[in-house]
Image (cartoon, helix red, strand yellow):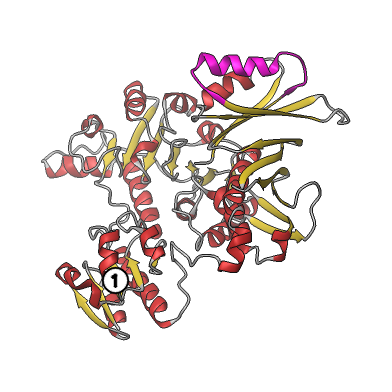
Amino acid sequence: MRVLVAERIGASGVDLLREHFEVDEGAEHLEHIADYDGLVIRSATQVTAEVLAKATRLKAIGRAGVGVDNVDVPAATKRGVIVANAPQSNVVTAAEHTLALLLALARNVPQAHASLTEGRWERSRYSGVELLDKTLGVIGFGRIGQLVAQRAQGFGMRVVAYDPFVGEERYRELGVEKAASSDDVYAQADFITVHLPKTPDTENWLDAEAFAKMRDGVRILNVARGPLIDDAALQAALDSGKVAGAALDVFRSEPITEHPLFSYPNVVVTPHLGASTAEATDRAGYQAAEQVIAALTGGSVTTAVNVPAVAAEDLEVLGPFLPLCRALGRIGVGIAGGLGTIEVELLGRIAERDTRPLVLEVLLGALQDHIEDEVNAVNAPGIAEERGIEVIESKRTSARDFSDLVRVTVDGQRVVGTVVGRRHRPHLLEAWGQRFNLQLSDHVEFFRYRDQPGMIGRVGTCFGEHGVNIVAAAVGYDPDADHDEAVMVVTTDGPVPQAIIDEIATTDGFVGGVAVTLA
């Protein structure tokens, strides 16, 4: 077998490949991609559908890094080519860089260095603060956030973290205090570091409102994604003295050499070095090589971002339920507001099959956009385990009222669905303790309220005032319940901002409101 290493990776990865295969190095060999069984790349090589069409022998692609945006994964999957990345290659490096910036920020290291090398001895000007007994607030407690917390504890820092998608047991294991909300972190932290994924919900997470809730003199770090911080709001907070300093490794657009904050004496910046170490580069190449070797020799490919399709005999039965399961996982987390335990009940004829793909789709829906790493069918179970998220499956071959049912319970909040008709359209049957029957679409909104006249009209009026078009709606109410609450589910033809949901949910008679985007 032959493997092409199209871009420079660590020598250890190349040496490992040579122990098993004939190896060529260099992008110029891509012209002869049809001669290779395996391909190792970094971020520059574009593996398009056209390239894959020529790669008639190709069985595996190893990406020496995390993202696989430069690979047409659907086209590779269609051709039976395994695509694997190296998701663990840079987590230590990113955590260590966060600590490097934390120390630099606390002790004014870059500023003092520049002053001294320019011929000035300004010892009193650059007096800093100790980390001992200070509180570090971590927003986003995934792999990197947890490593940062462990290292900060070594400096005697108290760590409080917010991430509703990490189980309480994981916090206890690490000796980290679990905050009920990001506001709780803001109220306590002397330093705040963000380690969130970049999604529409997390963009500008640290905005003017967030800064206003923080302690005076707080210091901010971002070694995750530039758009997590509202630059203008940070600048204003620095100008007012609310924020005593900031350390930034990432920016809204990159590369960038001119930025309003670059001239601030209390701002430390680096050019996206979070993953840039010799060890991380070597580790990424070695891990990618390991995955290619496993794929070509019949071993276990543990970091594949695509997996073989469900067997044909099962796909006919299970296939229509895959989108439903992902949607129920996403809705369940949205209603629960966090994630600790997921129970998946599969009822009816689907329970006669190998239901692991359905459970996996629920988990993917639950984790999607809530963690800092890309989640796929291969790494989702491992991510759930390391975050202390328990997944419990049960099944029964009979169902009441419908041929098949899927019940998903997230931290006590149950949602139920099925598929209906020849087109297998997903329908929601239960949420927030009430039953109804509504076809799901990409944008779904939920409201709990006292069952009294005019409530439906108030939602419609508010949506209309904001230009939101309602596609369908349903109401669930149990007259035998020991309360007078009802639940309304609305589907719309576009996303509804949380501000509109809050505008309705905070008015008299409403108990709560949630918007969930399934697309």
Q: Is residue 393 left or right of residue 156?
A: right
Q: Nearer the viewer, residue 217 or 88?
A: 88
- Compared across the picture, whether 162 is left or right of 341 comes to left
Looking at the image, residue 426 lies above or below residue 449: below
Q: Reply above or below: 502 against 336.
A: above
Q: Is residue 165 visible?
A: yes
Q: Secondary structure at mark 1?
A: strand
Q: Position of residue 79 (x, y in %)?
A: 38, 67
Residue depicted at 26% across the width and 71% down the height? 10
Amino acid type, residue under disc 1 in the picture: Leu
Whole-percent x, y for residue 157 in the image: 49, 47
Q: What residue is at 32 percent from the left and 59 percent from the top?
A: 71
From the viewer's perspective, tell me whether residue 296 is left or right of residue 18: right
Residue 401, above or below 62 = above
The image quarter containing residue 126 is top left
Residue 61, image quadrant: bottom left
Q: How many badges with numbers are in the image?
A: 1
Residue at 71% over, 40% down = 429
Q: Residue furthest front?
A: 422
Percent position (x, y) of residue 38? Answer: 31, 74
Give the image location of residue 418, x and y in percent.
Answer: 68, 47
The quadrant of the rendering that contains the N terminus is bottom left
**Residue tagged 1:** 39
Which quadrant of the figure has residue 451? top right
Neighbourhood count class around disc 1 (C-alpha, 10 Å): few under 14, some 14–19, many 20 upward: many
The residue segment tinted magenta is: 449-470
Report the front residue among 4 and 256: 4
